Amino acid sequence: MAQVLVRQLDDKVVDRLKKRAKEHGRSLQSEVKTILEEAVPDYEAAWRRIDGFRKRLKKSGRKFSDSAALIRKDRDR
């Protein structure tokens, strides 16, 4: 796994990060890692999950209308 070093980080920022980590019951390193992971989500994995969900809906036999067409129709009213 890669490592990241952040230089010249203001002491006040580090103090706020430590406070936040304590509130979440995590170490400072774990808190910073979580913040970074949430800041840059894995969009490819998200699309794979969405596609899987769509496939399960199709297999259910239910019909779903095209939401873009519904929105367009509503806007044209």
Image (cartoon, rainbow, N blue to C red):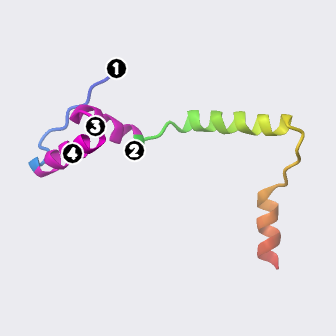
Determine the residue located farthest toward the top in the rendered image.
1
Q: Is residue 32 magenta?
A: yes
Quarter of the figure that contains the N terminus: top left
Query: According to the image, label 2 marks what residue?
Result: 39
Label 4 is placed on what type of residue? Leu
**Marks 3 and 2 close (CB-CB < 8 Å):** no
Q: Position of residue 43 (x, y in %)?
A: 54, 39
Q: Which residue position is annotated with label 1?
A: 1
Secondary structure character of the magenta stretch overall: helix
User: Label 4 to label 3, Cα distance in Å?
Assistant: 12 Å
Secondary structure category for the residue under label 3: loop
The tally of labels here is 4
Q: Earlier in the sequence, mark 3 or mark 2?
A: 3
Q: Which residues are magenta?
A: 12-37
Mark 4 vs mark 2, CA separation in Å: 15 Å
Mark 4 or mark 2, whichever is nearer to me: 4
